[in-house]
Image (cartoon, rainbow, N blue to C red):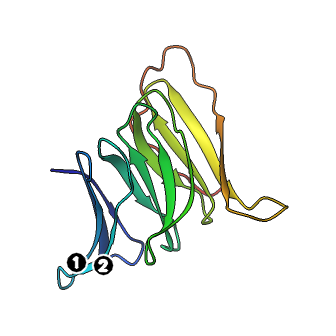
Amino acid sequence: QVTCMALHPDGETVASAQLGEGGVVSIWSTCDMGLRSSIDPGHSTGVGCVAFSPAGARLVTVGLDQYHSIAVWEWRTGVKVASAFGSEQKISSIAFALGEDAFATCGVRHVKFWTCAQPPEGGPAILVGRKGALPRAVTHVVCAQWTAA
């Protein structure tokens, strides 16, 4: 069962994700319906959100697991760049900033801003999140869009 989809900035590539353990993310060509890439994101109960970065090199996946785990991928190679626990509350949407390394997630009672950063000492990238402030009356942010200032 397909749970979510995202359109690549090239307008011809789509990522679709599945429900359930072993659910994969498939990246398709809309021109010939050919499979360009397939990622096993390792999310234990499936994938709830996917989004391509503005230049299209990266793909973010959000799991449907208890902690709504987040992973950043170089989708063409299937290499995981970074991952982190997202939120105990459901994540509904992902919105990238103008670059490849910053995005926001939102959902039940939260908005969170993420940065994928290389540590100064080297090694794998880390995913750092910080919570945004919401009015008490807001119980669910359904979608988000990043805009230039």
**Residue 8, position in %: x, y?**
38, 70
Residue topped by disc 2: 12
> Looking at the image, which is closer to me, 142 or 19?
19
**Residue 84, position in %: x, y?**
56, 45
Residue 145 can be seen in this image: no
> Looking at the image, which is closer to me, 10 or 60?
60
Tell me which label, 2 or 1, sits earlier in the chain.
2
Residue 128 can be seen in this image: yes
Residue 48 found in image quarter: top left
Specify the farthest residue to the top.
Answer: 136
What residue is drawn where x is 55% and y is 34%?
111
The CA span between labels 2 and 1 is 5 Å
Rendered view: 72 above or below 89? below
What residue is drawn where x is 30% and y is 78%?
12
Whether residue 131 sits left or right of residue 11 in the image: it is right
At label 2, the amino acid type is Glu
What residue is drawn where x is 49% and y is 64%?
73
Whether residue 101 sits left or right of residue 119 in the image: it is left
At label 1, the amino acid type is Thr
Whether residue 10 sits left or right of residue 80 in the image: it is left
Residue topped by disc 1: 30
**Residue 19, position in %: x, y?**
23, 46
Disc 1 secondary structure class: loop
Label 2 neighbour load within 10 Å: few <14, some 14-19, many 20+: few
Residue 27 found in image quarter: bottom left
Say whether marks 2 and 1 touch (CB < 8 Å).
yes
Disc 2 secondary structure class: loop
Label 1 neighbour load within 10 Å: few <14, some 14-19, many 20+: few
**Residue 49, position in %: x, y?**
36, 48
Quarter of the image with the C terminus is: bottom right
What residue is drawn where x is 52% and y is 59%?
72
